[in-house]
Amino acid sequence: MLNIHNLLGRKVKTLVSTEKEAGFHSIRWDATNDAGAPVSTGLYLYMIKARRLQTNEENGTAEVAFL
């Protein structure tokens, strides 16, 4: 799962909702929300949910700037 959130914590866009095989993957966000409308300039967070074989579930969050 890969989602984009605003700084208030609200989900703006779901980029990936299906499970992927292990390996390299890339995705490009077109700076729109789930309704297809453009988002405002600013900072956004992406939240990724990934499973590691050795340690069960692992989640991560980082920020991305849309200028």
Image (cartoon, rainbow, N blue to C red):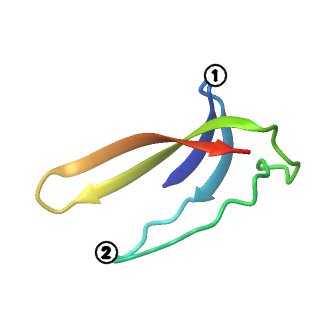
Task: Name the residue: 51% across, 65% down.
Answer: 18
Residue 64 - label: none
Task: Name the residue: 65% across, 29% down.
Answer: 10
Residue 13: x %, y % from top left: 68, 48
How far is the residue under mark 2 from the one under mark 1? Answer: 31 Å
Residue under numbered circle 1: 8
Residue 23: x %, y % from top left: 33, 77
The answer to which image quadrant residue 29 occupies is bottom right
Type of amino acid at the residue the image marks with label 2? Ala
N-terminal of the pair, mark 2 or mark 1, is 1
Residue 44: x %, y % from top left: 62, 38
Quadrant in which the C terminus appears: top right
Task: Name the residue: 63% across, 52% down.
Answer: 14
- For label 1, the SS is loop
Residue 43: x %, y % from top left: 64, 35
Q: Is residue 25 left or right of residue 28?
A: left
Residue closest to the far left = 54
The residue closer to the viewer here, 30 or 22, is: 30
Mark 2 or 1, closer to the camera: 1
Mark 2 burial class by Cα count in 10 Å: few <14, some 14-19, many 20+: few
Q: Name above or below for residue 51 compared with residue 47.
A: below
- For label 2, the SS is loop
The residue closer to the viewer here, 8 or 64, is: 64
The residue closer to the viewer here, 3 or 17, is: 3
Residue under numbered circle 2: 22
Type of amino acid at the residue the image marks with label 1? Leu
Task: Name the residue: 42% across, 72% down.
Answer: 20
